[in-house]
Image: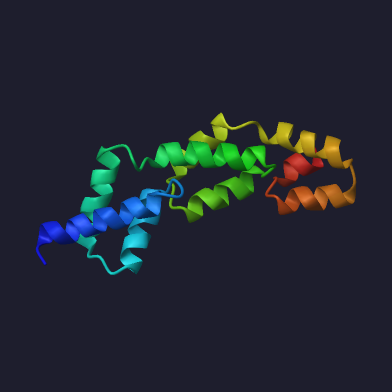
Amino acid sequence: MGVEAMTADAYECALRALHHRDRTEFEIEEHLRARGFSADDRSRAVETLRRNGLVDDERFAQSRASSLAERGAGNGLIRARLAEAGVAHELVDSALEAAEGEVARASRIVGRRGASPKTARYLYGKGFSGDVIGG
């Protein structure tokens, strides 16, 4: 099989991976690596996806951070999830700045659940900082 065919196969495989949800460049790379594509084919496929706007780590970070924040996640949990997806630290920071503030999210949860040690444990488990929980 020629180089162009292998690269085309990697690209098609990457497109299928994007069919159900947005993914980061890192996630696409890992998906293709797990399926045995060469580093060169993975790189070419990711570059083509990036050039066509189908893979955008900044867009992924903004969307995922917003979604997690809306579901009541604290900044620690959001940071961890984005890091797992291979998002660069500066994009994580930018996404957190754009999301609803952690204090506002925690206040909404406390308003719904009540102020109690149980709620504090819940907030801790959802990745809220000690300063926010204790504040």
The total number of labels drawn is 0
Which residue is depicted at the point 22% across and 59% down? 9
Residue 3 in the image, given as x and y percentages of width and height: 11, 61
Q: Is residue 105 left or right of residue 57?
A: right
Residue 92 seen in the current view: yes
Which residue is depicted at the point 56% across and 47% down? 79
Q: Quadrant of the C terminus?
A: top right
Which residue is depicted at the point 32% across and 54% down? 14
Instruction: Check the image and name the residue furthest to the left.
Output: 2
Q: Quadrant of the N terminus?
A: bottom left
Describe the colour scheme in one phrase.
rainbow
Q: Is residue 26 left or right of residue 40?
A: right
Which residue is depicted at the point 74% across and 46% down? 130
Residue 99 in the image, given as x and y percentages of width and height: 59, 32
Residue 108 in the image, given as x and y percentages of width and height: 78, 34
Which quadrant of the structure image shows residue 125?
bottom right
Residue 93 seen in the current view: no
Instruction: Say which of 92 and 130 sits in front.
Output: 92
Which quadrant of the structure image shows residue 38?
bottom left
Q: Is residue 115 left or right of residue 53?
A: right
Depicted 53 relative to depicted 6: above or below: above
Q: Is residue 6 left or right of residue 55?
A: left
